[in-house]
Amino acid sequence: MEKIRLQKYLAQQGIASRRKCETFIIQGKVKINNIITTQLGTKIDPKKDKIEVNGVEIKKDKIEKKYILLNKPIGYITTVKDQYTRKTVLDLVKEIKIRLVPVGRLDMYTSGALLLTNDGEFTYKITHPKHEIKKTYIVTLEGIISRNDIQELQKGVDIGDYITKPAKVKILSTNKEKKITKLEIIIHEGKNRQVRRMCEAINKKVIALHRAKIADIEVGNLKIGTWRYLTKEEINSLYK
Ligand code: URA
Protein backbone atom coordinates (compact mmCIF):
# COMPACT_ATOMS: atom_id res chain seq x y z
CA MET A 1 0.00 0.00 0.00
CA GLU A 2 1.08 3.53 -0.73
CA LYS A 3 2.41 5.71 2.04
CA ILE A 4 0.05 8.37 3.27
CA ARG A 5 0.34 11.48 5.42
CA LEU A 6 -0.37 10.75 9.04
CA GLN A 7 -3.07 13.42 9.49
CA LYS A 8 -4.85 12.28 6.32
CA TYR A 9 -4.86 8.68 7.52
CA LEU A 10 -6.22 9.63 10.96
CA ALA A 11 -9.01 11.69 9.39
CA GLN A 12 -9.86 8.84 6.98
CA GLN A 13 -10.15 6.50 9.93
CA GLY A 14 -12.76 8.78 11.47
CA ILE A 15 -10.65 9.94 14.41
CA ALA A 16 -11.57 13.61 13.87
CA SER A 17 -11.42 16.31 11.20
CA ARG A 18 -8.09 16.70 9.44
CA ARG A 19 -7.37 19.95 11.32
CA LYS A 20 -8.13 18.34 14.68
CA CYS A 21 -5.87 15.40 13.77
CA GLU A 22 -3.08 17.86 12.98
CA THR A 23 -3.54 19.35 16.44
CA PHE A 24 -3.34 15.87 18.02
CA ILE A 25 -0.03 15.32 16.22
CA ILE A 26 1.43 18.69 17.24
CA GLN A 27 0.36 18.05 20.84
CA GLY A 28 2.32 14.79 20.86
CA LYS A 29 -0.75 12.59 21.20
CA VAL A 30 0.09 10.37 18.25
CA LYS A 31 2.61 7.51 18.17
CA ILE A 32 4.00 5.66 15.17
CA ASN A 33 5.43 2.27 16.12
CA ASN A 34 5.53 3.30 19.80
CA ILE A 35 7.37 6.59 19.11
CA ILE A 36 5.68 9.97 19.48
CA THR A 37 5.78 12.10 16.35
CA THR A 38 4.96 15.80 16.21
CA GLN A 39 5.88 16.19 12.53
CA LEU A 40 2.87 16.96 10.33
CA GLY A 41 4.59 15.83 7.15
CA THR A 42 5.28 12.30 8.38
CA LYS A 43 4.15 9.58 6.01
CA ILE A 44 3.08 6.17 7.19
CA ASP A 45 2.32 2.81 5.66
CA PRO A 46 -1.12 1.89 7.04
CA LYS A 47 -0.45 -1.81 6.41
CA LYS A 48 2.82 -1.98 8.33
CA ASP A 49 2.85 0.84 10.86
CA LYS A 50 1.22 0.71 14.27
CA ILE A 51 -0.56 4.01 14.95
CA GLU A 52 -1.84 5.11 18.34
CA VAL A 53 -3.84 8.20 19.35
CA ASN A 54 -3.98 8.97 23.06
CA GLY A 55 -2.57 5.52 23.72
CA VAL A 56 -5.28 3.71 21.74
CA GLU A 57 -4.27 1.78 18.65
CA ILE A 58 -6.17 2.56 15.44
CA LYS A 59 -7.59 -0.67 14.12
CA LYS A 60 -7.39 -0.40 10.37
CA ASP A 61 -10.68 0.41 8.65
CA LYS A 62 -12.67 -0.95 11.56
CA ILE A 63 -14.94 2.07 11.75
CA GLU A 64 -17.69 2.01 9.18
CA LYS A 65 -18.00 5.29 7.31
CA LYS A 66 -21.40 6.95 7.31
CA TYR A 67 -22.57 9.76 5.05
CA ILE A 68 -25.89 11.38 5.74
CA LEU A 69 -28.01 14.09 4.14
CA LEU A 70 -30.26 15.90 6.60
CA ASN A 71 -33.02 18.34 5.71
CA LYS A 72 -32.33 20.69 8.59
CA PRO A 73 -35.32 22.54 10.05
CA ILE A 74 -34.96 26.10 11.34
CA GLY A 75 -34.35 26.35 15.09
CA TYR A 76 -31.52 23.81 15.25
CA ILE A 77 -27.85 24.71 15.82
CA THR A 78 -25.16 23.17 13.61
CA THR A 79 -22.71 22.03 16.23
CA VAL A 80 -21.65 18.87 18.00
CA LYS A 81 -22.40 20.28 21.46
CA ASP A 82 -24.18 23.49 22.37
CA GLN A 83 -23.04 25.29 25.52
CA TYR A 84 -26.60 26.57 26.15
CA THR A 85 -28.12 23.09 25.62
CA ARG A 86 -30.18 24.28 22.66
CA LYS A 87 -31.39 21.78 20.05
CA THR A 88 -28.59 20.68 17.73
CA VAL A 89 -28.66 18.91 14.37
CA LEU A 90 -27.29 15.79 16.10
CA ASP A 91 -30.61 15.50 17.97
CA LEU A 92 -32.16 14.71 14.57
CA VAL A 93 -29.86 11.76 13.80
CA LYS A 94 -29.84 10.16 17.25
CA GLU A 95 -30.73 6.73 15.92
CA ILE A 96 -27.26 6.48 14.34
CA LYS A 97 -25.06 5.24 17.14
CA ILE A 98 -21.84 6.62 15.74
CA ARG A 99 -20.07 9.93 16.37
CA LEU A 100 -21.15 12.08 13.42
CA VAL A 101 -19.93 15.57 12.65
CA PRO A 102 -21.72 18.19 10.51
CA VAL A 103 -19.92 19.01 7.27
CA GLY A 104 -19.85 22.80 7.25
CA ARG A 105 -22.62 24.78 8.83
CA LEU A 106 -26.13 26.13 8.37
CA ASP A 107 -27.13 28.91 10.72
CA MET A 108 -29.96 28.47 13.20
CA TYR A 109 -32.61 30.15 11.01
CA THR A 110 -31.59 28.44 7.76
CA SER A 111 -33.14 25.18 6.63
CA GLY A 112 -32.11 22.57 4.07
CA ALA A 113 -29.26 20.36 2.94
CA LEU A 114 -26.68 19.52 5.57
CA LEU A 115 -24.24 16.62 5.33
CA LEU A 116 -23.05 14.69 8.38
CA THR A 117 -20.31 12.10 8.48
CA ASN A 118 -17.69 10.34 10.58
CA ASP A 119 -15.18 10.58 7.70
CA GLY A 120 -12.85 13.48 8.52
CA GLU A 121 -11.20 13.33 5.12
CA PHE A 122 -14.57 13.74 3.41
CA THR A 123 -15.29 16.78 5.61
CA TYR A 124 -11.93 18.27 4.64
CA LYS A 125 -12.69 17.78 0.96
CA ILE A 126 -16.15 19.32 1.08
CA THR A 127 -15.31 22.30 3.27
CA HIS A 128 -11.92 23.32 1.90
CA PRO A 129 -12.43 26.39 -0.35
CA LYS A 130 -9.93 25.08 -2.93
CA HIS A 131 -12.39 22.34 -3.92
CA GLU A 132 -15.06 24.93 -4.79
CA ILE A 133 -18.07 22.78 -3.97
CA LYS A 134 -21.20 24.60 -5.18
CA LYS A 135 -24.00 25.32 -2.72
CA THR A 136 -27.44 26.30 -4.00
CA TYR A 137 -29.65 28.49 -1.81
CA ILE A 138 -33.25 29.60 -2.21
CA VAL A 139 -33.63 33.03 -0.65
CA THR A 140 -36.90 34.82 0.02
CA LEU A 141 -36.34 38.56 0.27
CA GLU A 142 -38.44 41.49 1.33
CA GLY A 143 -39.00 43.87 -1.58
CA ILE A 144 -38.52 43.76 -5.31
CA ILE A 145 -35.01 43.26 -6.62
CA SER A 146 -33.53 45.47 -9.33
CA ARG A 147 -31.29 44.32 -12.19
CA ASN A 148 -28.54 46.28 -10.52
CA ASP A 149 -28.98 44.33 -7.25
CA ILE A 150 -28.70 41.05 -9.15
CA GLN A 151 -25.57 42.21 -10.94
CA GLU A 152 -24.01 43.30 -7.66
CA LEU A 153 -24.61 39.88 -6.12
CA GLN A 154 -23.30 38.18 -9.25
CA LYS A 155 -20.12 40.25 -9.33
CA GLY A 156 -19.40 39.95 -5.62
CA VAL A 157 -20.24 42.23 -2.70
CA ASP A 158 -18.43 43.54 0.35
CA ILE A 159 -19.71 41.64 3.38
CA GLY A 160 -17.53 43.47 5.87
CA ASP A 161 -14.39 41.43 6.12
CA TYR A 162 -14.51 39.87 2.67
CA ILE A 163 -15.51 40.51 -0.95
CA THR A 164 -17.53 37.55 -2.18
CA LYS A 165 -16.48 35.70 -5.33
CA PRO A 166 -18.71 35.81 -8.42
CA ALA A 167 -21.99 34.00 -7.77
CA LYS A 168 -24.78 32.66 -9.96
CA VAL A 169 -27.99 34.49 -9.17
CA LYS A 170 -31.41 34.20 -10.76
CA ILE A 171 -34.89 35.41 -9.90
CA LEU A 172 -37.28 32.51 -9.33
CA SER A 173 -40.37 34.64 -8.71
CA THR A 174 -41.55 38.08 -7.69
CA ASN A 175 -44.78 38.89 -5.93
CA LYS A 176 -45.51 42.57 -6.49
CA GLU A 177 -48.56 42.57 -4.19
CA LYS A 178 -46.75 41.03 -1.24
CA LYS A 179 -43.50 42.74 -2.24
CA ILE A 180 -41.45 39.56 -2.05
CA THR A 181 -38.73 38.20 -4.32
CA LYS A 182 -37.45 34.64 -4.45
CA LEU A 183 -33.90 34.13 -5.68
CA GLU A 184 -31.64 31.18 -6.38
CA ILE A 185 -28.06 31.95 -5.35
CA ILE A 186 -25.20 29.55 -6.07
CA ILE A 187 -21.91 30.13 -4.28
CA HIS A 188 -18.85 27.97 -3.70
CA GLU A 189 -17.51 29.69 -0.61
CA GLY A 190 -18.67 29.14 2.93
CA LYS A 191 -18.12 32.33 4.92
CA ASN A 192 -20.14 32.65 8.09
CA ARG A 193 -23.79 33.63 7.24
CA GLN A 194 -22.56 34.46 3.77
CA VAL A 195 -25.87 34.58 1.90
CA ARG A 196 -27.55 36.68 4.57
CA ARG A 197 -24.62 39.09 4.60
CA MET A 198 -24.64 39.28 0.78
CA CYS A 199 -28.30 40.30 0.92
CA GLU A 200 -27.60 42.80 3.69
CA ALA A 201 -24.89 44.28 1.44
CA ILE A 202 -27.56 45.20 -1.13
CA ASN A 203 -29.87 46.42 1.66
CA LYS A 204 -32.36 43.60 1.37
CA LYS A 205 -33.93 41.76 4.27
CA VAL A 206 -33.98 37.96 4.19
CA ILE A 207 -37.35 36.45 5.10
CA ALA A 208 -36.33 32.82 4.59
CA LEU A 209 -33.21 30.93 3.57
CA HIS A 210 -33.07 27.33 2.45
CA ARG A 211 -30.13 25.32 1.07
CA ALA A 212 -31.53 23.22 -1.75
CA LYS A 213 -28.32 21.52 -2.93
CA ILE A 214 -24.71 20.74 -2.13
CA ALA A 215 -22.95 20.09 -5.45
CA ASP A 216 -25.56 17.89 -7.21
CA ILE A 217 -26.97 16.45 -3.99
CA GLU A 218 -30.48 17.76 -3.52
CA VAL A 219 -32.75 17.65 -0.48
CA GLY A 220 -35.65 17.43 -2.96
CA ASN A 221 -38.67 15.96 -1.21
CA LEU A 222 -36.84 14.68 1.85
CA LYS A 223 -39.18 15.71 4.66
CA ILE A 224 -37.94 18.56 6.82
CA GLY A 225 -36.21 17.20 9.95
CA THR A 226 -35.52 13.80 8.36
CA TRP A 227 -32.37 12.31 6.83
CA ARG A 228 -31.19 9.66 4.40
CA TYR A 229 -27.89 7.97 3.59
CA LEU A 230 -26.01 9.28 0.56
CA THR A 231 -25.81 6.81 -2.28
CA LYS A 232 -22.40 5.49 -3.43
CA GLU A 233 -22.77 7.56 -6.60
CA GLU A 234 -23.39 10.72 -4.57
CA ILE A 235 -20.33 10.11 -2.39
CA ASN A 236 -18.16 9.43 -5.43
CA SER A 237 -19.49 12.48 -7.25
CA LEU A 238 -18.14 14.70 -4.45
CA TYR A 239 -14.66 13.24 -4.88
CA LYS A 240 -14.42 14.25 -8.59
N1 URA B 1 -25.47 31.58 4.26
C1 URA B 1 -26.16 32.01 5.33
O1 URA B 1 -26.44 33.18 5.47
N2 URA B 1 -26.53 31.09 6.24
C2 URA B 1 -26.27 29.78 6.12
O2 URA B 1 -26.65 29.01 6.97
C3 URA B 1 -25.57 29.36 5.00
C4 URA B 1 -25.16 30.29 4.08
Image: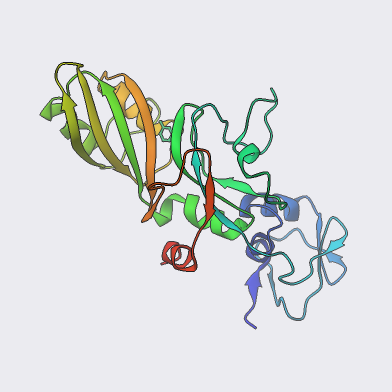
Residue 158 visible from this viewpoint: no
Residue 229, image quadrant: bottom right
Q: Is residue 236 left or right of residue 101?
A: left
Q: Is residue 36 left or right of residue 220?
A: right
What's the coloring here? rainbow
Q: Is residue 237 above or below residue 217?
A: below
**What residue sits 13% from the left and 25% below the top?**
146
Quadrant hosting ligand 1: top left
Residue 222 appears at what percent x and percent y?
44, 46
Towards the viewer: 124 or 114: 114
Which part of the image, by quadrant, shows the N terminus?
A: bottom right
Number of numbered markers: 0
**What residue sits 25% from the left and 22% below the top?**
202
**What residue sits 57% from the left and 31% below the top?**
77
Which part of the image, by quadrant, shows the C terminus?
A: bottom left
Q: Is residue 143 left or right of residue 92?
A: left
Residue 172 visible from this viewpoint: yes
Q: Is residue 187 above or below residue 120?
A: above
